[in-house]
Amino acid sequence: MSSLLGAAAGFRSVESNPRPRSVIPGRQRWDVKLVLGRPRTAEVLAAALRRIPGITEAHANPVTGGVLVRHDARVHATDVGRIVRRVVTLVAEDPAGAGRPAPARPVAASAPQVDRGLVVRPVLAVGGGVAAGIALVKGSALTRQLVAVGGVAVATAAVVRKAWRGSVDASRDAAGPGAERHPLVEIVGPHRRRLYGAVSLSVACQASEMALGTLLGWTGLVLIKGEAAPLVSLGLTTASAQLFGLAGLMAVACAAVAGLSYASNLQWRRLGQDIEHDWRNRTYAHVQHLELRHLEGERTTRIAGALTDDVRQLGTFFATSAGDVLQLGTSLALLVPLFLLLAPQIAWIAFLPIPVIAWLSLHYQDEVTADYAVSGEHRARLHSQLVNTLEAGATVKSFCTEDYEAERIDRLSEEVQDSSRRTDRSTIRHAETVRVCTTSSMAGTLLIGGRAVLDGSLPFEVFSPLIGLPQMVLLRMNRLGGIVDQYQRTITAYDRVRRLRALPAETNGTGGPLDVEEVRGEIVLDGVTFAYPDRPPALENLSLTIPAGQVTALVGATGSGKTTIAKLMMRFQDADTGSVLLDGRDVRGLSRHDLRHAIGFVAQDPFLFDGTIADNIRYGSFGVSGEAVVEAAMRAEAHTFVAALPDGYDTVIGERGAALSGGQRQRIALARAILKDAPVVILDEATSAVDNETEAAIQRTLRVFAADRTTLIIAHRLSTVRHADRIYVMDKGGVVAEQGTHDELLARHGLYASLWQLQAGEPAA
């Protein structure tokens, strides 16, 4: 690792702000705006990264702006993050680095235009510096003090402006082309009215608090000198009258501070709750409409984490840290003019820590970005493993691996602990640095202000009420580390939620609606080819017909494309080439909602919700009566075992139907499909977990249920499909090897006959 850090020791920091997309041990993905639309720059960046010891692979994509870095697992991911930033710096500053090609100019074109800002800004900076130098050398004491205050203000403005512009640029890059608003503005969304109310209350509360501080200063002045001159003009001429008057004013100020603080905190918390509620609902609604291929490609625990922890973080920032930021800003907005008017001699030392603390905080934010990404990744892995292990309880116990799983969780928990300690060290180090700066400023203000009082240049009547106010602000700045910490967590959480919401949702089709009552149910696959990502084709130029009103079966080896056909019919996936037709209409032109409403689907491993048996049978047909539920259960051969349960149809079955056996779950799911009463029914290994006697009873029921209904049965057990009107035998590569009735296929002595002999132990006739 030392060689890795040494190789990048000379790299300088830059304004370009690459952002980590994902960080896992040995691999990182980054968003780097520098390479967008710049193929040559992307090549230079990737080559530069590959030359660094410890980095094994690097690729930069000029189309997406993504950079992939693989590195030695022994190198800490945070160190690699720093290297990525520094290499981006080097490439950005290298004059040989290729950017976007300049547009061609006509030969007779006029001389190139120079950006006036590139000339004006340096001239103004140099001129201002010279003027400030002259003022410091030849000016009066007041002039020097004002110049010092101006320098503090300019430094603060420069730090904040640079950080804000970098944050906005980064948010635009993350959100994509056309994004103009800062992430915090995006997070607030439609809740601006409540935000404005919270802001107004916080400003009023802070003003009241500073007024209370001023009254306390006047009280001390009365006790020391016997009177406060500003109060004499109000008719309070004696010390006793002034103390009583100040006591009354402080009581009013205390009541105002308490009331406004209560109201503002309540508004901020309600704003946080509104944001959390709104983002969770909108994001979950989007997730429900994701294309199944994207939903299956994401870990469920990660999605759940985005919908819970990350969304909660969005609301938490506004419920807590946003109010602190506003109070700090309000304090500065009130104090700076007050000091400039009344005590310019000590204004510069009172506010000197502000640009330093601002720079330290914003620099800290940049430095810990990768640390937070690593910590979040480790937490997601731990959460995922915890959930998976708990769901696999029977498997864990049957293989006696309880201790192994406990050790695995212990290792993952240690990784979380280590990454959390790293971020905690950075946070505490920053907070203590801020504390040193504020304490030094307080001591300097007392020293310089005290000397000004002693030499008569600053009246004690002015110094006394003001002395406590900067300390109030600077002590509040101790929270800046925590604020930046929460801000960083919020931006990271926002990025994860935004990426989830950026996944494409299903389109609803381009054609007209589908009337379920008029569906006949003929399904035709015409030259269909389909391949899952990074896999060979599951179906290749497949053509077959599933007649309306008949029972059609698909049998064949595992991986021959049987379930894929069902997914194409349901539009869980779309064919790469060819078409799937329902009653002569391409399903891609039909409303997905109408199409799926016309098809009843029972999977091999059906999902049951944590609720009662009746609720699970009624799912999707919520308005049906209890009698209809019982009738559907009877037709699915489920009524007998349900009636034997202590609570019958009101029995709670737990998550995923954990209280039921596999065969019982399949019968509940079959009852659900029967209750739906769709014109097309797909049974994908729907009776694979039931015994032969139950299956025979279900088959008898299905023959009645399938009358005048298109039924597709996908099965490995050939006894399930022997009575089908047509059987397609699928072979590897998604091709139809044979087709016909059960008897016709046995008579051919082909693949189907061989499978029958293996399963039934009977030779083909």
Image (cartoon, grey):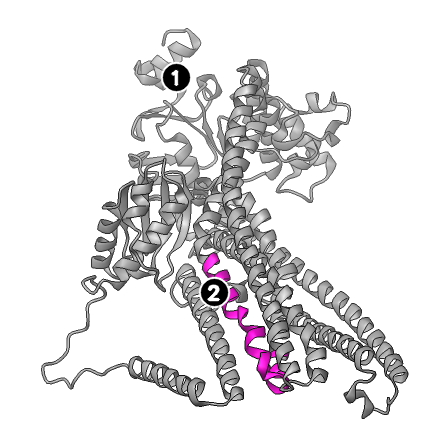
The circle on residue 743 is: 1
Q: CA distance from mark 1 to mark 2?
A: 83 Å
- The segment highlighted magenta reads 335-364
**Of marks 1 and 2, the one in the foreground:** 2
> In the rendering, at what x and y percent does residue 574 appear?
38, 45
Residue depicted at x 26% and y 59% = 91
Measured along the vertical axis of the image, is residue 185 above or below residue 626?
below
Left or right: 298, with 115 as reference point: right
Residue 660 visible in image:
yes
The residue carrying mark 2 is 359
Residue depicted at x 32% and y 31% = 734
- Picture quadrant where residue 568 is located: top left
Considering depth in this image, is 371 or 35 the residue closer to the camera? Answer: 371
Left or right: 756, with 112 as reference point: right
Which secondary structure is most common in the magenta stretch? helix
> In the rendering, at what x and y percent does residue 753 appear?
35, 14
Measured along the vertical axis of the image, is residue 466 above or below residue 358?
below
Amino acid carrying mark 1 in the image: Asp
> In the rendering, at what x and y percent does residue 81 appear?
38, 49
Amino acid carrying mark 2 in the image: Trp
Considering depth in this image, is 691 or 134 the residue closer to the camera? Answer: 134
Residue 577 visible in image:
no
Provide the secondary structure element on which disc 2 rests.
helix
Considering depth in this image, is 678 or 442 the residue closer to the camera? Answer: 442
Which is more N-terminal, label 2 or label 1?
2
Measured along the vertical axis of the image, is residue 385 above or below residue 110?
above
